[in-house]
Structures are given as C-alpha cells and as structure tokens.
Image (cartoon, helix red, strand yellow):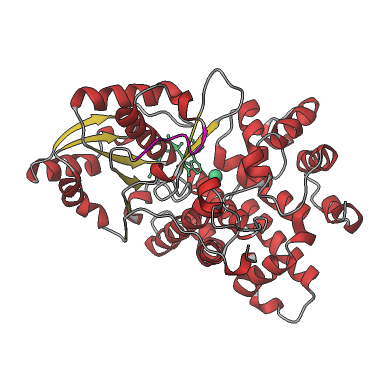
Amino acid sequence: MQSSDIYGVQRLPRSVLFGPGQRAALPTIARSLGKRALIVTDERLRTSKELAELLEGLEHCGVASHVFSNVEPELPVRCIHDAAAAGAAFKADVVIAIGGGSCLDAAKLAALLITHGGSLADYYGEFKVPGPTLPVVAVPTTSGTGSEVTPVAVVADSDRLLKVGISSPFLIPEVAVCDPDLTMTCPPGLTALSGGDALAHAIEAFTAAPRTWTSNTAYEHVFVGKNFLSDRHALSAIGLICKYLARACRSGADIEARTAVMQGSLSAGMAFGTAGTSLAHAIQYPVGALTHTAHGLGVALLLPYAMAFNRDRILPQLSAMADVIAPHLSGQTDIARADAVIAMVADLFTEIGIPSSLADIGVAEADLPKIAEFALGTTRLVKNNPRELTPSSMLELVQAAYAGNRAILNNPQRATR
Ligand SMILES: NC(=O)c1ccc[n+]([C@@H]2O[C@H](COP(=O)([O-])OP(=O)(O)OC[C@H]3O[C@@H](n4cnc5c(N)ncnc54)[C@H](O)[C@@H]3O)[C@@H](O)[C@H]2O)c1
Ligand SMILES: [Fe+2]
C-alpha cells in the first residue's frame, strides 16, 4: 500500500490530436484503422459543410462510409441499438463519432454492440465489456463532456428512472480529434452548460477522495480517485475554463477563447476519466430525471453547493486552485481563499446564465427527499466524495441547493459531522 500522493493512473486514447483545422486529418486516421466507416452523428450535422467535407475526404482515401444521424440529446437506448444495427448491416470496421457528448457516447456504445452483441443492459456498471471494440474516432463539437477520452458512456433507459453508465477502459476511443473550429457554432447557452460540465469534471476530479492504493486498484475500479496524473490535467483545466469560459459565451467567434475552453474540457476529461467525479454529478442524476434538464445544466448549478459542502475537507485543493485562479489572494487564510474560489465559480456561472437554485429549474420541494435518496444510491460517485455522506447531510445539501442558500453549508459545525 502506498500514499495517494505517489500513485498515478492514466488511461487515454492511442492518439489525441488538438488544434483548429485538425478535423482534416480524419480521412487519413480512418484509413489507418479500417475500410468501412460508420459515422455516428445527429440531425444538426447531417447536412453540414463539415460532414460533406469528411465524406468527400473518406471517399478520396478509399474508405466507404455510412452516416447514422439519428442520435438524440441525452441519449435514449433505442438510438444506440439503431446505430449498432446500421453499423452491423454496413459491415463497419471503424466508427467515427462527430457531435456533442450524446453522439460520442452513442458511437462508443454502438461499437460495443457491433463487436460483442447482446443488449446494452448486459453492460451496465463497471468492467462488463469483455474486450476491445471496433475502433472509435471521437470528434467533439462541444467543449464539455470529455467523452472523446473517457472510459464511460451514459444512456437514458426508459425502464429506469435514472440515466445509467457503462464504464470500461475498452470504451476509450482509439483516437480523439479535438478541433475548436467545430465549437464555433455553439450558442451561448450550450457553451455555458457544456463548459460548466467540464469545470465540474475538473474540480470533482481534483477534489476527489484520496484512496488507499494496492497494485490491483486500477483493475478493481474504473475510476480510481485523486492521483498525481489526474491532478495535473485537472488543475490545468480549472485555470483555462475559469479564465476563458465567460469570454467564449459572450463572443462565440473568439477562437482564442474557444480553443482555451476546448483545451480545458479535454484536460478535464483526461482527469476525471481516471479519477472520477462525485457529488454534483450524483445529485444531477435524479434532478435530470425529474426535471428533464440537460446534464451540464444540473451539474453546473450544483457544483458550488457541493464545493461548499466539502470545503473543510478540501482546503489544500481549494488553496491550490486559488494559486491558479486567484493569485491576488495569496497571504489570506486558507478558509478565506477557499470561500473566494467557491464564490468565483458561482459568480462565473451566474455571469453565463446558469440558474442558481434547484427551485429555478423546476424541482418540486416535495421531491427533495427522493432526490437525496437516489443521489446517495449512486455508489460510484458517492464513494469518490471527500466528505462522508449520510442521508441527513445529503438532504441538507439538496435543501440548500433548492433554497439557493450556499452560506448555510459553510457552517463549520455542520462540516464536521
Ligand atoms: N461519456 C462521458 O464521459 C460523459 C461525460 C459527461 C456527460 N456525458 C453525456 O453527454 C451528453 C451531453 O453532451 P453535450 O453537453 O455535449 O450535449 P449533447 O451532445 O446532448 O448536444 C446537445 C445539443 O447541442 C447540439 N450541438 C452539439 N454541438 C453543437 C455545435 N457545435 N453547435 C451547435 N449545436 C451543437 C446538439 O445537436 C444537441 O441538439 C449527456 O448525455 C451526458 O450524460 C458523457
Ligand atoms: Fe459530466
């Protein structure tokens, strides 16, 4: 056993390309991996110039292609079975995912079903994927989910209230191509909520509970908690997103801001893809199911509350974040710097139009106990939280987020419970 500060795990695609215009490499990449490409995307891109260029490039390289463009946001299971059926009928040997997190997750899971068959429910949970899948080339068009580099995909199964995850290192795409040009069309609202999701990935990875490691940890858990490799990416993501997200929302044509936010979301994906996420994500699951609001919206709204709730367990991490995003506060106490960091995150979200309470997004007060109970049931996320969670503390947190009262969570007497 070793202490957490000298433990590291990193699982990544074989190649990650980043930069404006890098999508032009896609035909060459596809040709290196196969001869028949299934392209998984949504209606928005079906008639776009970008897709037309990709299809032309593939043809030029001698790669046959078939486009599946029926992916729906938040990803119903049906989309994945349809995409897999289309890919199998076409005899695809490589999958290209282009779109937001929903398209990337759909492609990862379609590749899984094409290769291993069965029904998606066979793979719910961790380590259920039996081996490598068809290679996936992931091309994000939002700066948010990090799915282009992560071992997880999330679906909405109509048989279950909460969305459900499939996590396996075999789901990590073979190649990620991150081209910030593709995010220039994101409207301010989408930029805000996907950027908020990315910031939550980075902060929750950076503040995840330290674990006691053994040499088997990485083979017993897909998400292994905070470690020195994930920390590097997480802190870099926090700096970039805090500095540039408001600019990207205000001025969508600002390529410098778009590029920085995409660097941030990629780095955040590299961090949480091994460390995992925690509390804000745990509560978003039932909130999203009850309000039908987007993943990124709920996660961003909840993040400052989760940070305040955990504050006294994560002072060193908040201090390290302050060094990056609030260097002018050096010399102040750890508590003052921690509160300033939490307030900066909350203020950023207010500035970009994220609602600040669960009441604002249509949560009913009567549903708070149910939300707390379901959130506590998301074991994978709850076990990653740095402060122990009990039914009563989870309910207090959810009530504070409903009322829009973050200050109540900073009562030191509560934080020691
Ligand atoms: N696998 C992971 O690691 C991971 C992590 C976090 C979230 N997720 C999942 O990802 C999904 C959310 O992904 P998302 O936030 O990227 O949104 P999304 O993929 O659900 O897309 C939302 C909407 O934005 C549109 N859109 C996408 N790119 C655009 C662009 N460049 N310009 C204009 N419109 C664009 C889409 O067409 C869609 O209508 C959820 O299902 C969530 O559960 C996955
Ligand atoms: Fe997320």
Question: Residue placed at 66% from the left, 31% from the top?
Answer: 286
* Res 402 quadrant in image: top right
Q: Quadrant of the N terminus?
A: bottom right
**Nearer to me, 170 or 21:** 170
The quarter of the image that holds ligand 2 is top right
Question: Residue placed at 38% from the left, 22% from the top?
Answer: 118
Q: Is residue 91 above or below residue 394?
A: above
Query: For the stretch drawn in magenta, what is the main secondary structure?
Result: loop
- Rendering coords of residue 35 (x, y %): 14, 39
> Which residue is the extreme one toward the right?
413
Does residue 237 appear anywhere in the picture? no
Does residue 151 appear anywhere in the picture? yes
User: What residue span does the magenta drawing correspond to?
Assistant: 125-131
- Rendering coords of residue 222 (x, y %): 52, 46
Q: Is residue 15 above or below residue 236?
A: above
Asked if residue 127 is among those painted magenta in the image, a careful observer would answer yes
Question: Residue placed at 78% from the left, 31% from the top?
Answer: 368
Question: Residue placed at 35% from the left, 53% from the top?
Answer: 13
* Res 390 quadrant in image: top right
Q: How many marks?
A: 0
**Left or right for 285, reference 48:** right
**Left or right for 75, reference 84:** right
- Rendering coords of residue 241 (x, y %): 53, 60
- Rendering coords of residue 47 (x, y %): 25, 33
Asked if residue 45 is among those painted magenta in the image, a careful observer would answer no
**Left or right for 178, reference 34:** right
